[in-house]
Amino acid sequence: MKAREELMVPKADVRTYYDRPVLKAPVWKWYIPAYFFTGGLAGASSVLGLGAQLTGRRALRRASRVAAFAGIGASAGLLVVDLGRPSRFHNMLRVLKVTSPMSVGSWLLAAYGPAAGVAAVPEITGWFPRLGAVAGVAAGVLGPAVTTYTAVLVSDTAIPAWHEAHAQLPYVFAGGAAATAGGLAAMCAPAAEAGPARRLALMGAALELGATQLMEERLGEAGAPYHEGEAGRLTKLSKMLVGAGAVAIAVGRKRRTPAVVGGGLLVAGALAERMAVFHAGKQSARDPAAVVAPQRRRLAAGRTPTGI
């Protein structure tokens, strides 16, 4: 009898006050997803550089560490542009709050940046090789956290397209970072030493594509932005670029031209994916139903709604 009564209850019409958005869309500009991208490139390149150091691949080590230094340098510049002035980053280091992804990320960057810079010095100038080796180990150890902390940062919000993807988004970012670092190193290092870079690029591409597909499936209705508007177009573009880049590197193997083309496609694909995630968050925040419907389901299940 109870089941029959429940069937007679009409489906709830998710509405808000005059259908206005419940959340304010992120005010970030393009340089924030670019910051996510360059930071991921830096972290994954440091991991690849540490592997090259341990296996005696000098040219691959040099290419990876220079890429890591360039990536974290670009990240610092993009972050300062967003903050407005450098002193604001310094102010974030006054307190360490382990429950805040932003606080932990600030300290992580403060430790990783100098390590990546010192590791690159002997590769560029030839000075202090022992100090560079020690710094390379430190940067390589911190690298995985640098590639994924921004995914945790955006997931720790009430925006459905980001929050509901908290279990998959770090893998999407990690895969994109690995594909970028491997693809760029395959472009720059001699073919004889670029084997680990090619393998990292292929594994990263597979992880990025697989995690993105899983994220879209698990999101359900909250994943609609990844199929619509600017985010939808960027998502399709990213998948095409990453897939084509992986094929070029796999087929070309040790040939120079396919490595350059494939690496470039992987880099472009990972950047497009960061942009897609960024725009999906904006589109999701502007959709009242995407915010209210999950909140109501959590209340019905006896759970605390997001952001309360």
Image (spheres, rainbow, N blue to C red):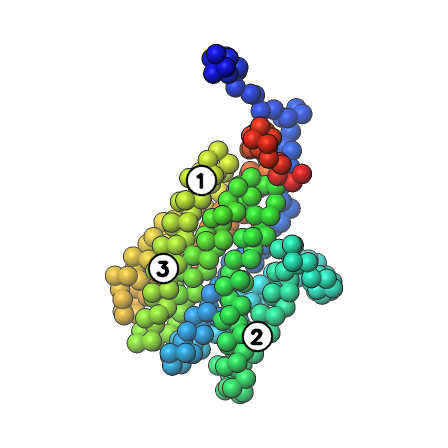
Residue annotated with mark 1: 218
Q: Work out whether mark 2 precedes mark 1 in sequence or the reverse, and give the earlier one.
A: 2
Residue annotated with mark 2: 115
Q: Residue 206: x, y in percent?
A: 36, 54
Residue extending farthest to the front is 1
Residue drawn 59% across and 52% down? Answer: 153
* Residue 187 visible in image: no
Seen in the picture, residue 157 relative to 266 is either above or below; the reply is above
Q: Residues within 10 Å of mark 1 (few under 14, many from 20)?
A: some
**Which residue type carries mark 2?**
Ala
In 3D space, how far apart are the residues under numbered discs 2 and 1 (Cα atoms)? 37 Å
Residue 137 is labelled as none
**Which residue type carries mark 1?**
Arg
**Which residue type carries mark 3?**
Met
Residue annotated with mark 3: 203
Residue drawn 44% across and 44% down? Answer: 215
**Label 2: element kind:** helix
Q: Residues within 10 Å of mark 2 (few under 14, many from 20)?
A: many
Q: Residues within 10 Å of mark 3 (few under 14, many from 20)?
A: some
Quarter of image, res 259: bottom left
Residue drawn 46% across and 57% down? Answer: 174
